[in-house]
């Protein structure tokens, strides 16, 4: 029995290696792309001007460039990967703004900021998840990724504007 199990285990490991090998090597360019995405988002924000509407024009720029002119020609997984890549940058910016804002507030304001962020996280999740509930199919997955990217970008900008208004010390 042991011989059969070790052969089966060996075949399983070989099959997984073949199946996942391309995924592992494909992840390497993603790391390089993240730094390009970071520069692209930051450059857009720097040139967009001041104000929520101007800054929000940067949301989707990186994902749109990644997806290309014909979203229908892409697999859902590719579209989602593009949106997730941009969302990672917005999430980074959101966390940086949150930490900076937290440091600039008094204790009472910090408690309220934490509560506000928890409520926003819950609202974002419920809002974006509703797309799946409404459409009830895999076509909702790129929509959810788009929703998460858009809402995370909007929140990062929202918090950054508060940081910009903190008194300088």
Image (cartoon, rainbow, N blue to C red):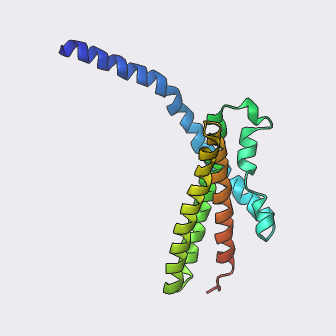
Residue at coordinates 49% horizontally, 79% vertically from top-left?
111
Point 18% across, 13% down: residue: 1
In this rendering, the answer to whether 132 lies above or below 41 is above
On the image, which quarter does residue 41 sit in? bottom right
The residue at the point 61 percent across, 41 percent down is 141
Residue extending farthest to the left is 1
Position in image of residue 150 (x %, y %): 68, 55
Q: Nearer the viewer, residue 30 or 74?
A: 74
Task: Report the quarter where the C terminus lies.
Answer: bottom right
Q: Residue at x 67, y 45 (%)?
A: 143
In terms of image quadrants, where is residue 5?
top left
- Residue 111 is left or right of residue 72, and the answer is left
Placement of 25 over or under 18, stated as above or below = below
Q: Position of residue 38 (x, y in %)?
A: 65, 54
Image position, residue 134 (x, y; %): 63, 45
Vertical order, 100 against 154 (above or below): below
User: Total of numbered circles in the picture?
Assistant: 0
- Residue 2: horizontal and vertical position, in percent? 18, 16
Query: To which quarter of the image does residue 158 belong?
Result: bottom right
Q: Depth check: 127 or 10 in front?
A: 127
For residue 151, above or below residue 133: below
């Amino acid at each position: 029995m042991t011989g059969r199990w070790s052969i089966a285990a060996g075949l399983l490991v070989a099959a997984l290696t073949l199946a996942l090998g391309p995924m592992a090597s494909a992840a390497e360019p993603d790391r390089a792309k993240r730094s390009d995405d970071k520069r692209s988002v930051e450059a857009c924000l720097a040139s967009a001007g001041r104000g929520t509407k101007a800054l929000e024009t940067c949301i989707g720029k990186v994902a749109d460039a990644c997806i290309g002119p014909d979203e229908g020609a892409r697999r859902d997984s590719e579209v989602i990967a593009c949106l997730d890549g941009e969302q990672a940058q917005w999430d980074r910016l959101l966390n940086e703004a949150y930490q900076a804002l937290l440091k600039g507030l008094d204790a009472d304001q910090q408690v309220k900021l934490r509560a506000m962020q928890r409520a926003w996280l819950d609202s974002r999740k419920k809002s974006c998840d509703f797309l799946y509930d409404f459409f009830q199919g895999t076509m909702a997955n790129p929509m959810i990724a788009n929703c998460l990217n858009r809402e995370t970008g909007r929140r990062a900008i929202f918090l950054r504007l508060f940081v910009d208004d903190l008194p300088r010390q």
